[in-house]
Amino acid sequence: MRDLVFATNNAHKLDEVRSIVGHRMNILGLRDIGCDEDIPETADTLEGNAELKARYVKEHYGYDCFADDTGLEVDALGGAPGVYSARYAGPGHDSKANMELLLKNMNGRADRRARFRTVIALVEGDDLRLLDGVVEGFITDGPKGSSGFGYDPVFRPEGLDVTFAEMDSDAKNAISHRGRAMKKLLEYLIK
Ligand code: IMP
């Protein structure tokens, strides 16, 4: 069976991918290959960061690998926080502070349009393939709901009247940026 690394230590993301791929492939996480380093994410685009992570694993550990990177792009803020979504309010990766800063910067703005975008980079040998997934929506006036993580309480997907944090994980995954990008990847991998 073919080994393929998913450059993450997020057990939830790994379980999700493993359950879809089944016995067709052996999906390894970073811990499974003995990697406990902080892989550099120094690019200024989602594509660049996803590629950096996937190539790092290929170069240092020898495995074919895929990596994802996600950002929330808000039109009224010129696409911010974008690639800096995790660190919007500072290096602490504090979701609550990030959300508060976003709501403050959106205060009084009529254009609330935003989207989550996930880019996946797949490195197989020397080949690079980039896939993406997008969900369009709006930034709410205040947080609502308690499921999910990150900016979920302030993001309302287009066509729905609830935030991501008011949806259960299956409903969110069915339409989410990451769900859509992952679906494209898995369709390619299991072909
Ligand atoms: P990552 O590339 O998956 O680590 O995502 C980067 C940052 O984007 C996270 O730290 C979150 O702040 C935000 N983010 C990513 N995916 C989601 C999501 O599904 N809901 C809410 N926020 C997210």
Image: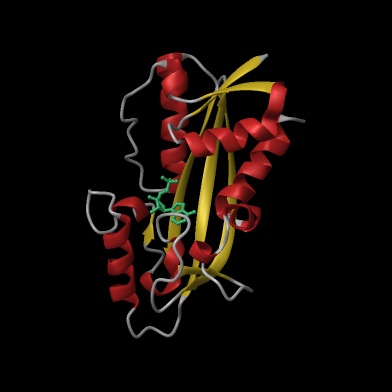
Instruction: Report whether 182 appears left or right of 77.
Output: right
Residue occupying image coordinates x 33% and y 68%: 102
Quarter of the image where one finds residue 149: bottom left
Could you say where residue 87 lies in the image, as x and y percent from the top left? 29, 52
Residue occupying image coordinates x 68% and y 30%: 21
The residue sitting at the right extreme is: 191
Residue occupying image coordinates x 28% and y 53%: 94
Instruction: Report whether 97 appears left or right of 14.
Output: left
Depicted 150 relative to depicted 158: above or below: above
Could you say where residue 8 lies in the image, as x and y percent from the top left? 45, 32
Instruction: Report whether 97 appears left or right of 126.
Output: left
Depicted 7 relative to depicted 134: above or below: above
Of residues 146 and 69, the one drawn nearer to the viewer in this rendering: 146
Could you say where residue 79 lies in the image, as x and y percent from the top left? 41, 64
Q: In this rendering, does residue 123 appear at all?
A: yes
Q: In this rendering, does residue 129 appear at all?
A: no
Of residues 85 and 46, the one drawn nearer to the viewer in this rendering: 85
Of residues 62 and 171, the one drawn nearer to the viewer in this rendering: 171
